[in-house]
Image: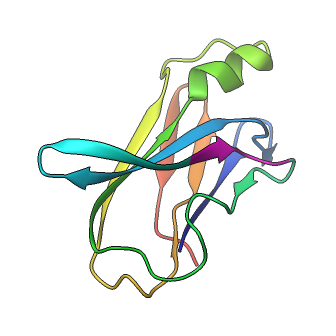
Amino acid sequence: MITTHILDTTLGKPARAVPIQLEKQSGTDWKLIGSGQTDDDGRLKTLTPPGPVEPGLWRIRFDTKQYFAAIGTKAFYPYVEVVFEIVDGAAHYHVPLLLNPWGYSTYRGS
């Protein structure tokens, strides 16, 4: 399973209603696997159904421009793409995003 959440580090609270897309690499193309938006706690738990996912390269795209526009903040990055590799498809992969108008950080969470 693949999940994510976003924390707006400038405001010190979750980033809600951020559109997100999850894709898996297929040859030289990317195939859309799931999408949605963060809840009031900044989380999106429904990118994949529960259970194993296919090993390979995956990409999460966070629509940060829409989020910052909604809260009336100018920002440098219109979107953030995080590419990661899954080897063990049975493991849980949690990919958080720490976000502010001028930067971001990510890591593999639990």
Give me the residue at 24% from left, 52% from top: 25
Does the magenta segment cover residue 101?
no
Front residue (pair 47, 8):
47
The residue segment tinted magenta is: 35-39
Q: Is residue 101 visible?
A: no
Res 45 quadrant in image: bottom right
Picture quarter with the C terminus: bottom right
Question: In the drawing, does residue 9 fall left or right of residue 52?
Answer: right
Front residue (pair 10, 50):
50
Residue 9: % across, % down: 69, 43
Give me the residue at 70% from left, 48% from top: 7
Front residue (pair 51, 43):
51
Question: In the drawing, does residue 57 fall left or right of residue 46?
Answer: left
Residue 88: % across, % down: 33, 85
- For the rendered model, the colour scheme is rainbow
Give me the residue at 52% from left, 62% from top: 95
Res 41 quadrant in image: bottom right
Give me the residue at 54% from left, 72% from top: 109
Residue 45 vertical position relative to residue 100 in the rendered view, above or below: below
Residue 40: % across, % down: 87, 47
Front residue (pair 69, 92):
92
